[in-house]
Image (cartoon, rainbow, N blue to C red):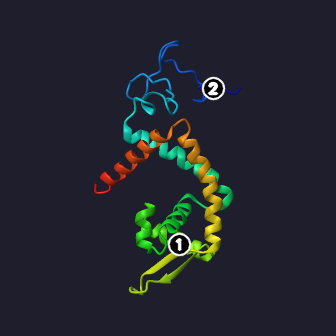
Amino acid sequence: MRKTTTRPPSRATATPAWPPKGTARRGRLGVAAAVPVRPPAPGEGKRGEDGHLAYLLRQAQAAARLSLDRALASTGLTHPQFVVLTMLKAYPGLSGADLARVALLTPQTVNVIIGNLERDGAIRRTPHPVHGRVLQSSLTRRGLALLATARRRATALDQRLAGGLNERELATIRRWLARLAAEFHQD
């Protein structure tokens, strides 16, 4: 006759004897496990008027960037490409290094963007008349048309950002943001 042995229940199905039912479970260090807490939504608590200015600026920038990325998706442009085209329209003939500074991008990123935009026929590069090794970039007709399409989509975002503000408030905000950029540029 075979002896039957009873196996202990597997760990997956075993009910722990401790802690007793109805008491808090304790983690590895003996501290009661916390109930998951949900962070406040944007605009509430420290993500709202009680928040630190630098965090609030970053939060607003991230939300605006995401909205702009979505708006630009149908144009085939990325946000950095849009910035490069915008800066080249405002300041034609910039070198890659100068373009990186005004577009707030790394020189390596700008170099890749310029190469892609040049290959797509949106910009052209020509040697600087005095410093021949320096290449100056400018928009082509295709680049201007692409920028015009992207600018229409970006203008809708600008209007959303300015919603509820009068001209004076908007001018104050623009001056404040420009002053911050100038002041902290040296840091």
Q: What secondary structure is found at the residue carrying circle 1?
A: helix
Q: Is residue 39 left or right of residue 142?
A: left
Q: What secondary structure is found at the residue carrying circle 2?
A: loop
Which kind of residue does numbered mark 1 sit on?
Ile
Above or below: residue 140 compared with residue 19:
below
In the orientation shown, which residue stands out farthest toward the right?
1
Between 20 and 38, the residue placed more toward the observer is 38
Residue indicated by mark 1: 114
The quarter of the picture where residue 140 lies is: bottom right
- Point out the tag, 1 or 2, that comes first from the N-terminus: 2
Point 54% across, 46% down: residue: 64
Badge 1 vs badge 2, beta-carbon distance below 8 Å = no
Point 61% across, 76% down: residue: 119
Residue indicated by mark 2: 5
Image quarter in which the N terminus is found? top right
Between 182 and 27, the residue placed more toward the observer is 182
Q: In this view, does 184 lie to the left or right of 172?
A: left
Point 48% across, 14% down: residue: 23
Indicate the position of residue 92 as horizontal and vertical percent values.
49, 72
Indicate the position of residue 39 as horizontal and vertical percent values.
49, 30
Which kind of residue does numbered mark 2 sit on?
Thr
Indicate the position of residue 38 as horizontal and vertical percent values.
51, 28
Between 151 and 21, the residue placed more toward the observer is 151
**Number of residues whose C-alpha sits closer than 10 Å to that of mark 2, classed few (under 14), some (14–19) or many (20 or more):** few
Q: In this view, does 55 lie to the left or right of 10?
A: left
Find the distance from the CA under tag 1 to the CA under tag 2.
75 Å
Number of the front mark, 1 or 2? 1
